[in-house]
Image (spheres, rainbow, N blue to C red):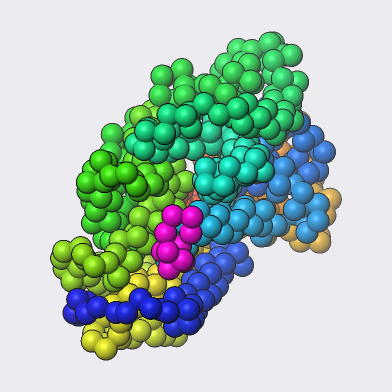
Amino acid sequence: MDVTASINPANFIDKAFNRFFIVAVFFVAVFQLLSLFTVDIMNIDSSQYALISKEMYLSGSYLEVYCRAADYLDKPPLLFWSAALAFKNFGVNDWAFRLPSILVYVLGLYSLYRYAKLFYHELVAKLAVLVMLSCVASYMMVSDVRTDTLLAGWILFALWQLAEFNKTKKNVNIILGAIGIGMAMLSKGPIGLVVPVIAFSCDFFYKKQWSHFFRWQYIVALIVVAVVLLPMSYGLYLQYDLHPEKNVYNLQGPSGLEFFYWTQSFGRITGENYWDNNPDPFFLYHSFLWSFLPWVVFFIPAYYHELKHIIKSRKLSHKPEVITFCGFTFILIFLSLSKYQLPHYTFLIHPLAALMVAKYLHRCCFSDVKPKYVSTVFRINCFVMLLLFLGMALIINFVFPANWLYNLPVLICLGLFLFYMLNKNIERLYKLVGVSVVTIVAVYYVLSSCFYPNLLRFQSDSVIAYDLNKPENADAKIYVVNNFCGFALDFYCQLPVKHVSEEELKQNLIAGKTFIVTDSATAQNWKAHYSEIKIIKQYNDFSITQLTPSFLNPSSRPQKLRKVFLLKY
């Protein structure tokens, strides 16, 4: 496990590493994209966004956004617009919903590469892309598409273009950067502007480039951003500001413009936004620890060395860029101030963490003054990777027992892992990177082929939709009593789904053509009062995004499931 031997950087990037990079990216991407064909859209956020996009496509209402025919005032519309366009061209299905976000994510990875090349060796740029592509957050951004995938892609594009502008002074770059900021804001609000402003302001301040704060091109950039945001702003004005009589989310006559530009983002810090899940002050920090696996062990010394280098270089005439470090640090602090937090909130800064890790790996292999304790860090990382292999074995053989053949790809990856870990003749960079890459390939394989396909059997509403999508039910009516199910039923079901109260249901019963989805108590009550009602099927249901040890344990799992019933009148 010795990783102290030096390697000659001369021509290293030209052939050998390029082959390694292409092969690694290919396998990581293949097993990541496998989820498009094996993993359903998950409740709650992703399925709700898919449903909104479906409704937008079917209704043709692109400026005003609705969910289940009710006003929707939460996220900006870019995800819905792009998914609705994909539905128009490829039909309403889950991979079409994910496709636009994945394409923007690919743009983001390319932008990360170009951004890194502006400041560092091409090897660092390629390592940054590989690290980002092969972390757990990347898998979640592709398989469980939310607004964060678009946000990360467009922010990376904006950072690249703005960095190009600082270097070349070409006006086309600041215009493209402004378009990136506008698209990021259309993805998830003002955070799309906050990230580049904070990151570049810190860089200007650190380098004492005071004139960079006052450039006439910024006025042009703001105009471009305003033009990009104009369609959404007009839609918000039409839907809300012109209708003070509306009551949305218990807000009487909310201003759509004020909600989007202030309340939804900054209001989570000031307390003006009613969303509050009372998060642990360090929630996003420990969420980052698992979402940045398998690179988090390298990230800790990488962050330390980055901070140390910035402090030591503060008096030098040629100072390093601090956009990456400050962008990661201060945005993480900013997000942690929110009174409502979810793990995916940090996904937008994972690429910056990936670049710091790439720089650390390059320093470990090529720097004249190499970081201390590299071998120790490598050993700790190998131990963490072995724990991941143990977790994969538990998933395949205990949590969701599968055919023993499912173990074979994992065993192949384990063999490659041991090869990289124990072979003393492998150059240091391949050893440091190889153990993590082959591990994450195995993780992606297990998640896409075993874990999520089995887990989604307990997302009952999507399973119900598949059962209802039969030719003989073409003219049936589907009713969900008391909003019992999530959004996946509405999205996957090929027939209109109506959410009604029990009183409303009584007025819409049509003999032989009415299906009812409800819980156990309501099902038994209706069966007792209506002899014509029959229980067609019973389903096991669990909130799959809130996993618990008792659910993952097959012996205690039955006690944690709730029953969902499909009735027919």
In the rendered image, residue 335, in percent from the top left (x then y), is placed at 39, 35
Considering depth in this image, is 320 or 322 the residue closer to the camera? 320
Residue 134 among those drawn in magenta: no
Q: Is residue 100 left or right of residue 323?
A: right
Query: Closest to the observer: 270 or 207?
Result: 207
Q: Position of residue 262 (x, y in %)?
A: 53, 21
44 up-or-down from 245: above or below: below
Q: Residue at x 48, y 59 (%)?
A: 117
Residue sitting nearer the eye, 419 or 471: 419
User: As displayed, is residue 312 above or below residue 371?
Assistant: above
Q: Would you say 11 lies left or right of 69 here?
A: left
Query: Position of 360 compared to 76: left or right?
Result: left
Observer able to see residue 314: yes
Residue 455 visible to an observer of this rendering: no
Give the residue at x 81% y 38%.
59
Q: Quadrant of the N terminus?
A: bottom left
- Residue found at x 69% / y 11%: 245
Residue 357 falls in which quadrant of the image? Answer: bottom left
Residue 169 spot, x, y in % from top left? 58, 42
Residue at the image point whose x is 33% and y is 66% from the top: 362
Query: Where on the picture, by quarter, is residue 190?
Result: top right
Q: Nearer the viewer, residue 385 or 156?
A: 156
Q: Main secondary structure of the magenta part?
A: helix
> Magenta residues?
117-126
**269, above or below 178, in the image:** above
Is 148 rendered above or below residue 205?
Answer: below
Q: Position of residue 365 (x, y in %)?
A: 29, 71
- Horizontal relation, residue 360 to residue 102: left or right: left
